[in-house]
Image (tube, rainbow, N blue to C red):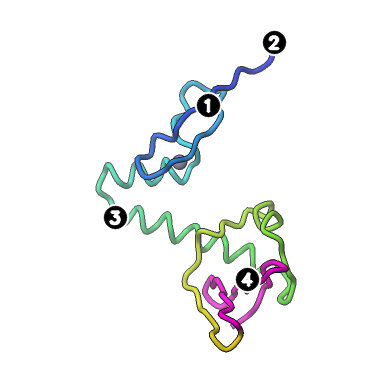
Amino acid sequence: MGLIFEMRHCAFVMCDEEFSVSNERKIFCSDRCRGRHHALINGEEAEMIRIENNMIIANYRILKAQRVGRVFRRTELRLLGYDLEYCSRYTINRAAGDTVTLWCYDLGLKVSETGYQLVSA
Ligand SMILES: [Zn+2]
């Protein structure tokens, strides 16, 4: 007998994700949404900030393990566990055709048509 999957909406009010589940008890699309949901209902802003910071730190560790100058495709970053939603800041270089760089502290991803190039500050 195969697993039976059903589509479900994430229970976190600020998330629109639909996900497939075989587990009746799963109500959030991700651990992040579960954490945000609990942070929200408990009114714990500090918890929310901690979760967001941990995401940025996790991204930073992924970048730190890579060679500066390497160009990644979006799917490659995703496979490494990198979440493009999280960065500590971003910069726009007006002199270089409005090039956007997403920074995790001193390491950044310079966005271009060919992908995301790892750069160091
Ligand atoms: Zn969600």
- Residue 12 percent location from the top left of the image: 38, 39
- Main SS, magenta region, reads strand
Residue 111 is marked as 4
Q: Amino acid at mark 2?
A: Met
Marks 1 and 4: in contact by CB < 8 Å? Answer: no
In the rendering, which numbered label is found on residue 89? none
Q: Residue lying farthest front?
A: 97
- The answer to whether the residue bearing label 2 lies less than 8 angstroms from the nearest atom of ligand 1 is no
Which comes sooner in the sequence, label 4 or label 1?
1
Residue type at numbered disc 1? Met
Q: Residue furthest bottom?
A: 95
Give the label on residue 7, or none: 1
Above or below, comparing residue 106 to residue 1 in the picture: below
Q: Which residues are magenta?
A: 97-121
Q: Secondary structure at mark 2?
A: loop
Earlier in the chain: of badge 3 and badge 1, it is: 1
What whole-number distance in Å separates the C-alpha atoms at marks 4 and 3? 31 Å
Residue 83 vertical position relative to residue 99 in the rendered view, above or below: above
The amino acid type found where label 3 is placed reads Glu
